[in-house]
Image (cartoon, grey):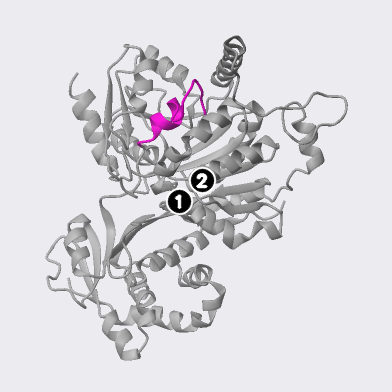
């Protein structure tokens, strides 16, 4: 086996490397802090000279997402990246992609909001990523990396899921993961799909040119007949149900014997894993449930913990309380569910979360 | 082994790159590493800091509010980070521009006059590697051989001609650092 390529890289930089190595066909983006290194790294690496991948700085986020729509409609593996305000600009396009059932990768390296907010890390876009953001009944597949290695790994995972389900996928990171450097092992270079391979793989839906002997494929999210539109909606919902049944990913740390469980994702989960170590050192049975997919959400896993007799759940997020709603739905009244968060680009420290856990749940008993 | 370090000073002093050299040196020594910068509006002349963690185990939180060691390179950072050194920890500072020297008695304090030494040598650009040399003398967390590889890996190829001068600065930093208490 070839020696592993261990590099020290920022989360944003590794996205660029991972996309090229996955065989991504095109990146369309517009710069915004704290994720501008994604496109900067792509421009430095010049993949158009090696794999033939297109890298294009569009004139706006609205352009970028619609270029993604075009590329995805042709069955290409295409992506964009932005940060919170830029993702809001893309919302219409994202809804269209979901409606037209187009696979693509969208990266949101979150910063604090609302509005222009701040450029420091936040998890204030959970609702936007998981519950919509754009209009209509749709879901994105949402992955939440908690390390630079996962930023790398999730690129391939998100593309694979997007194509498996013909659905846009989002990597919901934040400024902390994007700007942080860690060790990372890069995947080997894969060749990009050839046009013939794409025409074969995506023959039932992609606009790759109509051969004789089949109906033309139409890429659209428009259907003016309500009867037909309802059927499309039902088909989408059936797809989401399959996703919920088959594609939940999570990590459980010390949950087996835990009296209290912290639920946290992304950079917060990294911080909270240190909280668990501190709590265990004090003799408190605390565990961490980390959703890796935010949609589909590990509802069943949390419900099982509640049914097993966990005495309380703390949803620790860098926001005013968003994922906590999904935790409450999963726990369904079996145990108290509290939230602890920081906002405005502030991060919490492990001991701060432990203090919140004691104050809101343990000492209340 | 786990070392949680903050390097803090002005943007332009090479704070982030010093952290990167150390992080790469840690990678060469097979440590787990995290390098977490303050980022954004903090530009040349503003404040800049980076948290570097080196560990022989998986690193849980890359964010810390308590440090084993603080390397402090301006007064604002002294105000902010002196209180955040763990009891028994280490504080290293460059005396240039410091108007209020460290006061804590429960930590080890070292001073390094790297700004002055670099000015004397006419080599302002070697400031951060000289500080790194001072730090490594006090906290030899990575082997010098790995530091040299880390240094090379962190620099773009066009800057490799500066490697010998930086190696010399690291050595010199080790010589001029002095224990205050």
Residue A12 lies within the magenta run: no
Give x and y (percent) for residue A326.
38, 21
Report the span colored magenta: A124-140
The residue labelled by disc 2 is: A81
CB contact under 8 Å: marks 2 and 1: yes
| Marking on residue A208 | none
Vertical position of residue A206 compared to residue B36: above or below? above
Quadrant (top left, top right, bottom left, bottom right) of the C terminus of chain A? top left
Give x and y (percent) for residue A66.
57, 40
Q: Residues within 10 Å of mark 1 (few under 14, many from 20)?
A: many
Give A82 or B108, whichever is nearer the viewer: A82
The residue labelled by disc 1 is: A35
Q: Residue at x 51, y 52 (%)?
A: A59
- Helix, strand or loop at label 2? It is strand
- Helix, strand or loop at label 1? It is loop
Give A99 or A353, whichever is nearer the viewer: A99
């Amino acid at each position: 086996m070839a020696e592993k390529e261990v590099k020290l890289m920022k989360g944003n930089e590794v996205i660029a490397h991972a996309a090229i190595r996955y065989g991504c066909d095109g990146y369309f983006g517009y710069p915004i802090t704290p994720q501008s290194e994604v496109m900067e790294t792509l421009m430095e690496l010049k993949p158009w000279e090696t794999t033939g991948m297109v890298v294009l700085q569009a004139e706006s986020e609205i352009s970028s997402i619609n270029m993604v729509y075009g590329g995805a409609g042709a069955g290409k593996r295409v992506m964009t990246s932005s940060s919170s305000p830029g993702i809001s600009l893309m919302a219409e396009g994202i809804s269209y992609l979901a409606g037209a059932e187009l696979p693509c990768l969208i990266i949101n390296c979150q910063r604090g909001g609302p509005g222009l907010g701040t450029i420091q890390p936040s998890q204030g876009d959970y609702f936007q990523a998981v519950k919509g953001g754009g209009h209509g009944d749709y879901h994105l597949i949402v992955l939440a990396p908690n390390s630079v290695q996962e930023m790398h790994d999730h690129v391939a995972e998100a593309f694979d899921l997007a194509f498996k389900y013909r659905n846009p996928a989002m990597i919901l990171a934040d400024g902390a993961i994007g700007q942080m450097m860690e060790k990372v092992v890069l995947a080997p270079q894969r060749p990009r799909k050839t046009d013939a391979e794409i025409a074969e793989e995506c023959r039932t839906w992609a606009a790759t040119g109509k051969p004789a002997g089949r109906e033309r494929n139409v890429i659209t999210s428009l259907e003016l007949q309500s009867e037909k539109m309802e059927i499309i909606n039902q088909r989408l919902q059936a797809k989401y149900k399959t996703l919920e049944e088959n594609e939940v990913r999570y990590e459980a740390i010390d949950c087996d014997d835990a009296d209290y469980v912290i639920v946290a994702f992304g950079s917060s989960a990294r911080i909270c894993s240190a909280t668990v170590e501190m709590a265990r050192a004090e003799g408190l049975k605390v565990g961490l449930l980390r959703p890796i997919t935010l949609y589909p959400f590990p509802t069943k896993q949390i419900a099982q913990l509640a049914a097993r007799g966990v005495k309380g759940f703390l949803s620790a997020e860098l926001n005013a309380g968003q994922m906590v709603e999904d935790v409450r739905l999963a726990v369904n009244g079996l145990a108290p569910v509290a939230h602890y968060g920081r906002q405005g680009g502030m991060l919490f420290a492990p001991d701060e979360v432990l203090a919140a856990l004691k104050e809101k749940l343990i000492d209340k008993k | 082994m786990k070392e949680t370090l903050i390097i803090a000073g002005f943007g332009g002093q090479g704070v982030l790159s010093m952290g990167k050299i150390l992080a790469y040196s840690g990678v060469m020594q097979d440590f787990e590493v995290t390098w977490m910068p303050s980022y954004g509006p903090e530009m040349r002349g503003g404040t800049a800091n980076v948290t570097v963690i080196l560990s022989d185990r998986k690193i849980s939180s890359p964010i810390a509010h308590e440090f084993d060691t603080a390397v402090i390179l301006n007064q604002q950072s002294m105000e902010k980070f002196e209180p955040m050194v763990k009891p028994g920890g280490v504080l290293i500072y460059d005396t240039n521009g410091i108007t209020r020297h460290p006061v804590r008695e429960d930590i080890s304090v070292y001073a390094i006059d790297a700004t002055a030494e670099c000015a004397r040598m006419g080599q302002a650009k070697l400031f951060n590697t000289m500080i790194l040399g001072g730090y490594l003398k006090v906290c030899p967390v990575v082997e010098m051989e790995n530091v040299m590889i880390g240094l090379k890996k962190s620099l773009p190829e066009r800057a490799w001609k500066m490697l010998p001068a930086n190696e010399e600065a690291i050595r010199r930093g080790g010589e001029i650092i002095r224990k205050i208490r």
